[in-house]
């Protein structure tokens, strides 16, 4: 049981929330004079404060002892689950997961691991894959029904695609470059020589049920087509295709070959016929200036406005030690997060008094259901870097500060019981990362 649940809830009050002032409470207050109403109103914040104080005290005393078996390393990387902020309440859904607990499928040439709705039930509309390819190794030619948003985490790779007009595309991508392949667009990825000895990247799919085990692989499809049909389709002899039928029943998926030659040679090779695709399937993240920047960090927003091919919006966020991504929400889309570097904590407010704080580190995944309030605070001593990815083409958010400073001031003062001076100190524009 959450410690706060053992304490009596404070009496509701008409000053706390007009929306929660139900009929029962109205009856209770009928007949009270104005001074009695004022006293009742003043009592409520004090009662709430005592509730939080009681939980805080319990956490510091014997009530918080845990004499039973413990997984110490796991406890120590989740301090906000072991000793939650007293403002947390109730049993909120899990919104933490990690590639670090996902099974790695290791093959000759690299590995892959994924977090889908199977292991992360809250994330019904987005799945993530983390993959590594040695120099020359392929993620084989394939396509899938889900859209693929990607960022290179380390090293270099060569990507290929065919656009909707049947024109070819080939490009080399390096650390922090993005790419996006719409549904049904066939593509491949091949590791290149680099200081990371190949590459590692993150793939984000706009379907929580997506699985790397269920994509249309070139060798898988060819291997499951009768040889006489395949020969007739291409106008070649069956003998010329004998190696097609020697691949495993599930296709090659990841496999090692030689490092490719210069990019220019490959670009020239695909220029025959219709010519090269004019579509920019890739986006170099650091070619753009930060969308927002101050002493506490910076944010780059990449969506269909500056990366036209994408139907998935994203934000690349850097938060300095001690700073935080401010309290905000996204009006229309769920947020899927990936932590690239550093340590942080996030509280998600699930409405109805339900709130939970969880800790995040490199390799972890977070998820915030649409329109639920949250913040991300850097709890480490290095820059915290994370991604926000959304299954919608345009990035949208609203900040709590932005809302409160665009209301008639008295409305805010009446709700929060703060002074006019305090309200004036709240930033009146969205700053993204605080303090300014
Ligand atoms: Fe793919
Ligand atoms: Fe967010």
Image (cartoon, helix red, strand yellow):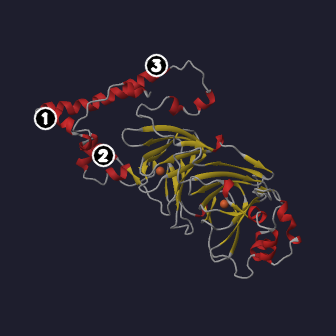
Residue depicted at x 78% and y 54%? 134
Q: Where is residue 145 drawn, in percent x and y?
A: 61, 62
Against 387, is 269 above or below?
below
Q: Where is residue 85 drawn, in percent x and y?
A: 45, 32
Alpha carbon distance from label 1 to label 3: 40 Å
Residue depicted at x 45% and y 35%? 91
Q: Which residue is mark 1?
A: 30
Query: Camera-side residue: 234 or 313?
Result: 234
Alpha carbon distance from label 3 to label 2: 38 Å
Could you say whether the residue bearing mark 1 is in a helix, strand or loop? Answer: loop
Seen as rendered, the residue at the extreme right is 239
Which of disc 2 and disc 1 is earlier in sequence? 1
Callout 3 touching callout 2 (CB < 8 Å): no
Alpha carbon distance from label 1 to label 2: 32 Å
Q: Where is residue 112 drawn, in percent x and y?
A: 70, 50
Q: Residues within 10 Å of mark 1 (few under 14, many from 20)?
A: few
Could you say whether the residue bearing mark 2 is in a helix, strand or loop? Answer: helix
302 lies left or right of 240: left
Against 398, is 172 above or below?
below
Q: Which residue is mark 2?
A: 423
396 lies left or right of 202: left
194 lies left or right of 324: right
Which of disc 3 and disc 1 is earlier in sequence? 1
Query: Camera-side residue: 224 or 170?
Result: 224
Tag count: 3
Residue depicted at x 62% and y 27%? 71
Q: Residues within 10 Å of mark 2 (few under 14, many from 20)?
A: some
Which mark is nearer the camera, 3 or 2? 3
Which of disc 2 and disc 3 is earlier in sequence? 3
Which mark is nearer the camera, 1 or 3? 1
Callout 1 touching callout 3 (CB < 8 Å): no
């Amino acid at each position: 049981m959450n410690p706060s649940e053992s304490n009596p809830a404070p009496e509701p009050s008409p000053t706390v929330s007009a929306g929660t002032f139900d009929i029962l409470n109205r009856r209770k207050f009928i007949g009270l004079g104005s001074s009695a109403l004022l006293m009742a109103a003043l009592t409520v914040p004090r009662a709430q404060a005592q509730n939080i104080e009681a939980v805080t005290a319990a956490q510091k005393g014997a009530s918080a002892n845990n004499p039973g078996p413990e997984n110490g390393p796991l406890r120590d990387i989740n301090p906000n689950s072991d000793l939650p902020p007293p403002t947390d309440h109730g049993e909120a859904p899990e919104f933490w997961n990690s590639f670090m607990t996902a099974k790695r499928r290791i093959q000759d040439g690299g590995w892959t691991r994924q977090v889908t709705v199977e292991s992360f039930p809250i994330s019904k509309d987005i799945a993530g894959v983390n993959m590594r390819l040695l120099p020359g190794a392929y993620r084989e030619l394939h396509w899938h029904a889900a859209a693929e948003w990607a960022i290179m985490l380390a090293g270099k790779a060569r990507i290929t695609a065919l656009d909707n007009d049947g024109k070819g595309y080939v490009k080399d991508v390096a650390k922090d470059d993005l790419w996006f392949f719409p549904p049904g667009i066939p593509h491949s990825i091949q590791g290149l020589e680099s200081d990371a000895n190949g590459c590692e990247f993150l793939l984000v799919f706009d379907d929580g049920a997506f699985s790397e085990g269920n994509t249309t692989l070139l060798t898988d499809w060819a291997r499951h087509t009768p040889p006489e049909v395949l020969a007739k389709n291409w106008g070649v002899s069956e003998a010329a295709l004998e190696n097609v039928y020697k691949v495993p029943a599930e296709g090659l998926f990841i496999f090692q070959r030689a490092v490719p030659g210069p990019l220019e040679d490959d670009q020239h090779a695909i220029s025959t016929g219709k010519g090269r695709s004019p579509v920019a399937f890739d986006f170099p993240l650091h070619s753009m200036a930060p969308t927002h920047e101050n002493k506490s960090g910076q944010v780059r927003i990449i969506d269909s406005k500056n990366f036209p091919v994408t139907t998935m919006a994203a934000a690349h966020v850097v938060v300095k030690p001690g700073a935080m991504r401010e309290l905000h929400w996204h009006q229309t889309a769920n947020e899927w997060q990936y932590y690239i570097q550093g340590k942080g904590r996030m509280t998600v407010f699930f409405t109805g008094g339900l709130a939970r704080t969880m800790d995040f580190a490199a390799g972890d995944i977070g998820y915030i259901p649409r329109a639920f309030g949250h913040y991300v605070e850097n709890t480490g001593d290095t820059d915290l870097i994370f991604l926000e990815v959304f299954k919608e083409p345009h990035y949208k958010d609203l900040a709590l500060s932005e809302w409160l400073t665009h209301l008639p001031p008295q409305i805010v003062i009446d709700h929060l019981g703060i002074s006019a001076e305090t309200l004036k100190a709240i930033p009146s524009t969205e700053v993204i990362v605080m303090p300014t």
